Image (cartoon, rainbow, N blue to C red):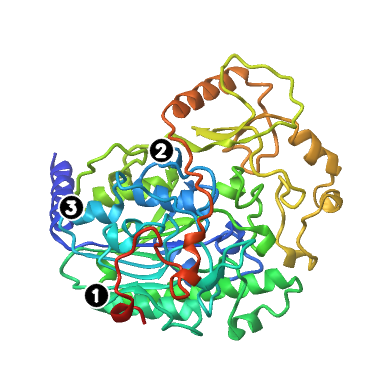
């Protein structure tokens, strides 16, 4: 009884101190960061000493999952909802499209604002809609914003062009108490240096005695592949140009992450911090990224597209490994639980904070990786039948316990996206493996095995805990599990909202907006007073 009383007293004191102290939540989301591109996953090649130190002193999320591309992931993070419920399940938002998170969606900073958490800031990439002014971060709960609204841009000029058009302009905006609008004041400054400078300004402004939330979405390591010379020199031995530039950009990312955490320490925030470091999807192998030993890449529903680096850090986070399923949509409810802030809308994410700090049972047993009704596989020759009404031609993937079901084409049919593990180019000092002719060199199997056998199957089942590289389809041996999971997809599909698929809008053309990408359907800035 005495031991139990002491233990109870310990947890009572911990809970009291935890509940009364200020908490500082920092979410860092890396862009197109491959599974093999952090050195705690891959001991050779690219080195990430700062990230390694953070995860070594934090909590590794060993089963962290995300969406397969950028916009769906960021929408899930900010809303706690699967992309099928926000209409952002199909593609990334093009810079000239008016799609985005709609008014009826409540975002994480808006929830925190409703709980009177006043220090809410964002730096970096938005990419969940900017056609209307009400879609922008400064209209969706963030006090300040410094960053870009779309998906990619030049790392020095902030310029971007809409593909297959001559619509080009600068995508960089700042919002604070004194300024709200697009600006070219950062022209020529490397994105890593720029966003670190903005983070420094914000972190130094934080009152450590009051709750805070910072969402940091650096541009690294998304293309264009532009790296600083001091980082390129470190990887001059890598022959493949894309891989060498990518590795140098990873070095920059690692440096930025280390500097941001140092800022938290110096400003007396780190001991009361709940930090997340996550990737938004798997690496893009055609732009230097790597996901070894996982199959696939960004854009695919294979593990290389949706299983990502993820961990937590900070003084309020326990040390070790968390082996429960954790999806990007869980970040919102987990943060809300940590702040003891109620959620006012039905969401898909699971609050996992109490499970993390008290070692409770894992809340999540299932993940809908995605359903995309616009991607129908009409070429596969799969005559198998299942006791389910699900259209197996539709691109979809579902995780249930150890099982993973894929229907349709898990990516996009292209010989440039092999559905098998691709080792980092520097291991062999050969170019990236992208073509059909090199498959047998890597796998020891004919190219027909992967491009014909695999892609002719409309249904695949894997047991991920035993086969993390998705090399053994066991759907034929487990028809009852396949059919159970197909019927779960039917239930999810019944709740899906239609994808947002607007045409490119010529009124978005920066030539009509003083050379800037900015809300074009409605905007609320005074160009003479607020545009720099």
Give the SS element for disc 2.
Answer: helix
Q: Quadrant of residue 82?
A: top left
Give the SS element for disc 3.
Answer: helix
The one nearer the camera, 340 or 355, is: 340
**Residue 95: in sight, yes or no?**
no
- Does 396 sit above or below residue 12? above
- Asked if the residue at tag 1 contacts the one at tag 3, i.e. Cβ–Cβ closer than 8 Å, the answer is no
Disc 3: CA contacts within 10 A as few (<14), some (14-19) or many (>=20)? some
Q: Quadrant of the C terminus?
A: bottom left
Q: Quadrant of the N terminus?
A: top left
Q: Is residue 360 left or right of residue 235?
A: left
User: Image point 66% across, 48% down: which residue?
Assistant: 296
Disc 2: CA contacts within 10 A as few (<14), some (14-19) or many (>=20)? many
Residue identifier under label 3: 114
User: Image point 84% across, 44% down: which residue?
Assistant: 447
- Does 334 sit above or below residue 449? below
User: Image point 19% across, 71% down: which residue?
Assistant: 208
Label 1 and label 2: CA atoms lie apart by 39 Å
Q: Earlier in the sequence, mark 3 or mark 1?
A: 3
Q: Which mark is residue 85?
A: 2
Q: Is residue 207 left or right of residue 229?
A: left
- Does 322 sit above or below residue 57? above
Label 3 and label 2: CA atoms lie apart by 23 Å
**Residue 86: in sight, yes or no?**
yes
Label 3 and label 1: CA atoms lie apart by 26 Å
Q: Earlier in the sequence, mark 1 or mark 2?
A: 2
Residue at the top extreme, as displayed: 387
Residue identifier under label 1: 268
The one nearer the camera, 198 or 432, is: 198
């Amino acid at each position: 009884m005495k031991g139990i009383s002491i233990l109870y007293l310990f947890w009572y004191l911990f809970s009291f101190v935890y509940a009364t102290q200020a908490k500082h939540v920092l979410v860092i989301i890396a862009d197109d960061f491959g599974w093999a591109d952090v050195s705690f996953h891959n001991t050779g090649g690219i080195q990430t000493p700062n990230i390694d130190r953070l995860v070594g002193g934090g909590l590794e999320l060993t089963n962290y999952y995300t969406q397969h591309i950028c916009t769906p992931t960021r929408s899930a993070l900010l809303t706690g909802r699967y992309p099928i419920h926000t209409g952002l399940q199909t593609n990334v938002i093009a810079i000239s499209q008016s799609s985005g998170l709609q008014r009826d969606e409540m975002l994480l900073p808006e929830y925190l604002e409703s709980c009177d958490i006043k220090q809410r800031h964002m730096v970096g990439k938005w990419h969940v809609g900017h056609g209307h002014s009400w879609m922008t971060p400064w209209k969706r709960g963030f006090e300040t914003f410094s960053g870009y609204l779309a998906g990619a841009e030049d790392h020095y000029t902030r310029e971007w062009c809409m593909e297959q058009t001559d619509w080009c302009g600068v995508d960089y905006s700042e919002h604070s108490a004194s300024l709200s609008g697009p600006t070219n004041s950062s022209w020529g400054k490397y994105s890593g240096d720029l966003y670190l400078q903005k983070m420094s300004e914000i972190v130094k402004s934080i009152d450590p005695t009051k709750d805070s939330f910072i969402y940091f979405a650096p541009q690294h390591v998304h293309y264009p592949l532009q790296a600083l010379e001091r980082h390129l020199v470190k990887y001059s031995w890598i022959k493949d140009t894309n891989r060498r530039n990518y590795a140098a950009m990873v070095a920059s990312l690692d440096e930025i992450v280390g500097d941001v955490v140092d800022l938290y320490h110096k400003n007396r925030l780190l001991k009361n911090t709940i930090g997340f470091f996550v990737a938004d999807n798997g690496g893009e192998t055609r732009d230097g990224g790597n996901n070894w030993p996982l199959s696939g890449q960004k854009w695919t529903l294979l593990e290389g597209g949706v299983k990502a680096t993820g961990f937590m850090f900070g003084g309020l986070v326990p040390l070790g490994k968390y082996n429960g399923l954790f999806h990007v949509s869980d970040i919102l409810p987990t943060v809300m639980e940590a702040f003891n802030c109620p959620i006012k809308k039905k969401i898909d994410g699971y609050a996992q904070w109490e499970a993390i700090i008290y070692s409770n049972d894992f809340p999540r047993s299932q993940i809908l990786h995605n359903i995309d009704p616009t991607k129908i596989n009409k070429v596969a020759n799969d005559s198998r039948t299942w006791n389910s009404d699900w259209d197996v031609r539709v691109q979809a993937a579902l995780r249930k316990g150890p099982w993973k079901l894929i229907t349709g084409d898990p990516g996009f049919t292209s010989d440039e996206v092999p559905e098998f593990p691709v080792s980092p180019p520097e291991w062999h000092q050969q170019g990236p493996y992208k073509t059909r002719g090199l498959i047998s060199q890597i796998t020891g199997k004919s190219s027909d095995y992967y491009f014909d056998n695999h892609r002719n199957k409309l249904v695949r089942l894997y047991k991920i805990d035993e086969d993390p590289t998705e090399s053994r389809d066991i759907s034929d041996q487990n028809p009852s599990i396949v059919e159970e999971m197909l019927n779960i997809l039917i239930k999810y599909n019944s709740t899906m909202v239609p994808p947002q698929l607007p045409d490119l809008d010529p009124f978005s053309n920066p030539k009509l907006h003083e050379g800037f990408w900015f809300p074009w359907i409605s905007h609320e800035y005074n160009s003479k007073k607020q545009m720099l």
